[in-house]
Image: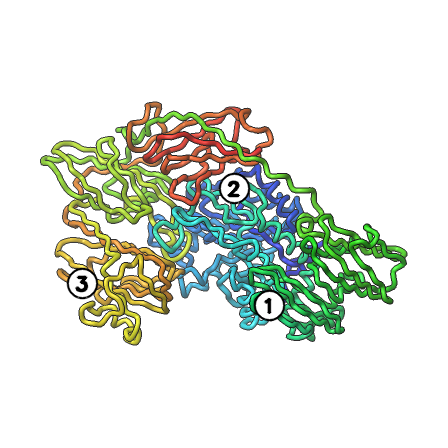
Amino acid sequence: MQHSVRVHRNGIELDGKPFYLLSGCVHYFRWPRAEWRPLLEQARWAGLNTIDTVIPWNRHEPQPGEFDFSEEADLGAFLDLCHELGLKAIVRPGPYICAEWENGGLPAWLTASGDMRLRSDDPAFRDAVLRWFDTLMPILVPRQYPHGGPIILCQIENEHWASGVYGADTHQQTLAQAALERGIVVPQYTCVGAMPGYPEFRNGWSGIAEKLVQTRQLWPDNPLIVSELWSGWFDNWGGHRQTRKTAAKLDMTLHQLTAVGCAGFSHWMWAGGTNFGFWGGRTVGGDLIHMTTSYDYDAPVDEYGRLTAKALVARRHHLFLSCFGAELSAVLADAIPGGMTVIAPMAVAGRSEGGAQPYRTVRAGPSAPPAWQQFCATFLMNPGLEATSYEVFLPDGEHLSVEVEPTSIRPIFANLPLGESGITITGHTGRILGYWPDQGTLVIYGHEGEQGNLTLQLPSPPVGIHADDAGLTARVRLRDQTLQIEYWITADGRRIEVAWEDHALLIELLPQRLAERYGSQPLPAAAPVQRTMLPTRAFAVLEATADTDWQPIPGPAPLEQIGCPYGYGWYRAEVDLTAPLDTVLAVPELNDRALVLLNGEFIGVLGVHPHGPRYTLPLSLPAGRHDLRLLVDNLGRFNYGLNLGERKGLLAPLYLDGAQADISDGWAAYWQEVQFAGEAVANVKPWAARPDAVNVHLGRFAWAGPMVWLIRTIEVVAGRRYRVHITGDRNSGAFFVNGIAVERFSRHRSGGFIATDITDLLRPGINTLALQILNYAGAPWRATLISYDAERPLPARWSFRAGVTVSDQPAPPTGPAFVQAVFARSDLPTNLRRLAVRPGTLDKGQIWLNGQNCGRFWQIGPQEEYKLPVSWLTAQNELLLFVEQARSGALELVYEG
């Protein structure tokens, strides 16, 4: 049989039959290969029918022409496993993928020069992409659904309209055509990048259902599909743990999507995984928004493969939509107001809140299939914190009192066909889990103790009705072909069988806790958490003192240009002084962070810091020869916005006579009449116009509004260079120097992060800085000014060495070191479900388990435990941590068995 895939207005069709997309994003490369099968089996259990994955070019081609499709990078094996387990697949080859992944998936060697226009038809970029596609597409093409494989959809680029590379829409067309020419035959789609001839899927979370409605209004023939349903969010170093998207909110969001006729969605993420090695990227919004090692994402499945409350919520929706979604979505998408009469709850003083309103109440439109012509629905919403009751009057006059739980939506349907059975649900108060015609089973669920009603229209009178508890918990009445059941939900659930001569209908009335696990074995009980302290030994870092194997370089240069695209790199400056030197060393261009060692002794940290950037360091040297070494840590390249392809490392020389000033305070704020003055405000002198607030501190300005201008002066000395570092929220706005726009920012560009040299816009004396922020809402900003003598670079001979290597010598008292611990597999439970390490008081560094890089650790929150994959264990195990500064204390293993 020749298989086919089609995407049209009502959604997806496979082999001519409607297919409701129930997808979850799983990044194969963020999970050890041994964990793929249980992860995918669990996804299938949860009701997913499709797995969605991005494909990181940089992970597969770490060096030009050198490809890696082994172990967790074996894309073909991952897709084959999806197929074996009966799961369809969506592939997203990019080449730009975002995904909170290093450089958005683009190889560092590709972007090293910085002179290539990324995500466009710049010939250098386009040709490199096409060469990559020549290697990638032969893996994808034979695994397409029309060729007997799992792949049903292929995305074109990713969120192209949010790239900041405006006016490059033809690039999407180039990529789509390249995929076609290389054998992609399944439908291709765009995501935040609509272009003629291709379906546009949407991304989002709050308000995503309304976004789909707007899409249908704009483009009537576009399918209502969500390509990324953001049911969680990523964590960044030094930020809050992202747990703000609750299971209750997911429940409401999925109901809203159903209500508007959504034809499918993909959870971003279904199971997030881990940023092993150095693969975590950074994103816009500040200088510390670098991804943590954990990519747990507060997803339905956590970093260790365990189900969360969100997974059980999602499973209930998945089961319902797998039964009804394909037909129901098309009817609801074109439904019209009316059908039922719904009376919303009234507020009663001192007793109930009231005020809730249905999310949507509709009836089938003229285009509905014959069996659905009398269908109508209401989605009763309760955003409050206490239960509320609606009064619902069905078209036939039946009256239902429906209680809706707090922070929830309860859909009520009338005249809902149960497949081809001829049975119709004419009314109900409980929640419908699903109808499975092969088993002839209808499942209704609710909370324990809930009173409910269910009315069915049968195709013919049954020959018998049997309740498994002799009618104690349910009252069953049959009038002609109308079956009415009044029941209450018990802890163990109840079954009612309606029998005909040759078949039967089984009605199961279940509590929600059983409905969430319906059709499966009981979930394993949570195992107790156990802890073991490991004794450690500390060793020196070879590069901290080694004098050989250094690569001479003319001066500081980006890491990716001198053979160190990822991880740590050492810059060595050998200085010969004929006289003592007492100065402040300035490091104006450093990405991202450096430990500084002078003659083997640790003297400080430069660059990114939780309490603000550090660009200067006091330096006092006697005459003679000195060895200055900077160990630079690349914390991850931007995965989003115009700074994609940023260069890492020490980008410019070190300078003498440096100075750093926090200029976060002393600003004047303007938001009243000056809003009519436009950008002329950018050059106003604070003493020449009346401000709305004076002596404003960017970190604590208590004001909210559509726009604010913040202006202050700085005094400049001739002969010095000046650089500003500004960081804040992901607002839109602009930064001006003496009335000239230096940078315009938005959440799709630099997004509240500015680091730039402003010397050429300055003049000796007083100069004006202006910061315009749109939609300001009180979020803290911070500004730093760095200056130095451009005529006095540090006189030095430069060399470079990549990486950090453990020595067999004991660690010195200060500075970087390695901490080692060993343990036996036999010391841990045989059935080990979860294994992690807690670094305790060790400050920052990298973790290796038996030589495999488990990722970065940094004890500034929110992550405090780091995954050790169980499949990476051997009989005897070495845990090796590179530690940048604090190496005292013990390591702790945390595990569940």
Q: Alpha-carbon distance for marks 1 and 3?
A: 55 Å
Q: Mark 1 or mark 3: which is in front?
A: 1
Q: Residue at x 25, y 43 (%)?
A: 556
Q: Position of residue 248 (x, y in %)?
A: 57, 56
**Tag 2 secondary structure:** helix
> Is residue 293 at all visible to an observer of this figure?
yes
Query: Which residue carries the number 1 mark?
Result: 359
* Image side of residue 623 versus residue 66, left or right: left
Query: Which residue carries the number 3 mark?
Result: 767
Which mark is first along the chain, 3 or 1?
1
**Tag 3 secondary structure:** strand
Identity of the amino acid at label 1?
Tyr
Query: Which residue carries the number 2 mark?
Result: 73
Give the image quarter of residue 152: bottom right
- The reply to whether discs 1 and 3 touch (Cβ–Cβ < 8 Å) is no
Q: Alpha-carbon distance for marks 2 and 1?
A: 44 Å
Q: Residue at x 21, y 42 (%)?
A: 617
Identity of the amino acid at label 3?
Asn
